[in-house]
């Protein structure tokens, strides 16, 4: 029986330009992200049929390979055309493709929180306004006392988008997990 991908449903605030969100709206979205992490991580593991008992790096590598194949399907990506001279033809993610990539980010967030307890905490970026993560929840961690952030949802989305052009780009989530794990095991 073919697997059916069921995209998540973000809260209504997601339809509003996040650059004008109030703090309450940013908190609403952050609460949705935080409450969805484990559910969506389990969903994508089941959907991709990867072994949830694998070590995090192996699990991410397996998931990345499967996502790379799935992204080629018409449900997840399509060709788009731009009238230009010469015409531009490129692959783009469909809504399902975007949702699948974000679910991969939920998986990365889940693994970071579960396997590096006490290292990461959710934070809403409120300054500077020009930050690419403005009003979004990110995982904050400290390196030598200095705060650093990672937005696992955006990171996975960017990797999947780039993978449409070059299949090597979807790979990167496992490397980031390994890097962060090594970084914080030295502390």
Image: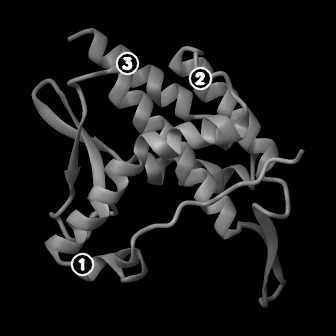
Q: Quadrant of the C terminus?
A: top left
| Among numbered discs 1 and 2, the one appearing first in the sequence | 1
**Alpha carbons under labels 3 and 1: distance apart:** 33 Å
| Among numbered discs 3 and 1, the one appearing first in the sequence | 1
Read off the residue under disc 2: 52
Q: Is residue 119 left or right of residue 169?
A: left
Q: Residues within 10 Å of mark 1 (few under 14, many from 20)?
A: some
The answer to which quarter of the image holds residue 167 is top right
Asked if residue 49 can be seen in this view, the reply is yes
Read off the residue under disc 1: 21
Q: Residue furthest front?
A: 1
- Which of 29 and 145 lies nearest the eye of the viewer? 29
What residue is shown at x 42% (from left), y 81% (from top)? 15
Q: How is the image coloured?
A: one colour
Residue 120 spot, x, y in % from top left:
25, 32
Q: Quadrant of the N terminus?
A: top right
**Alpha carbons under labels 3 and 2: distance apart:** 18 Å
Q: Secondary structure at mark 3?
A: helix
Q: Looking at the image, do the residues carrying marks 3 and 2 touch, with CB atoms under 8 Å apart?
A: no
Residue 64 spot, x, y in % from top left:
67, 35
Q: Residues within 10 Å of mark 2 (few under 14, many from 20)?
A: few
Q: Is residue 156 left or right of residue 82?
A: left
Q: Residues within 10 Å of mark 3 (few under 14, many from 20)?
A: some
Residue 56 spot, x, y in % from top left:
52, 20
Q: Looking at the image, do the residues carrying marks 1 and 2 touch, with CB atoms under 8 Å apart?
A: no
What residue is shown at x 61% (from left), y 18% (from top)? 58
Q: Secondary structure at mark 1?
A: loop
The answer to which quarter of the image holds residue 78 is bottom right
State which mark lies toward you, 3 or 1.
1
Q: Looking at the image, do the residues carrying marks 3 and 1 touch, with CB atoms under 8 Å apart?
A: no
Q: Is residue 125 left or right of residue 169?
A: left
């Amino acid at each position: 029986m073919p697997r059916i991908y069921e995209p998540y449903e973000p809260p209504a605030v997601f339809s509003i330009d996040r650059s004008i969100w109030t703090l309450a709206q940013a908190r609403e979205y952050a609460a949705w992200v935080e409450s969805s992490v484990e559910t969506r991580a389990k969903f994508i593991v089941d959907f991709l049929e990867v072994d949830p008992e694998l070590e995090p790096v192996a699990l991410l590598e397996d998931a990345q390979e499967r996502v790379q194949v799935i992204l080629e399907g018409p449900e997840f990506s399509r060709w788009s055309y731009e009238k230009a001279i010469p015409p531009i033809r490129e692959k783009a993610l469909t809504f399902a493709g975007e949702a699948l990539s974000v679910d991969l980010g939920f998986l990365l967030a889940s693994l970071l929180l579960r396997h590096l307890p006490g290292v990461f905490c959710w934070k809403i970026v409120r300054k500077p306004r020009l930050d690419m993560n403005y009003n979004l929840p990110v995982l904050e961690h400290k390196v030598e006392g200095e705060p650093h952030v990672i937005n696992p949802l955006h990171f996975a989305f960017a990797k999947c988008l780039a993978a449409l052009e070059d299949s090597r780009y979807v790979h990167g989530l496992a490397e980031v997990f390994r890097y962060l794990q090594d970084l914080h095991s030295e502390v």
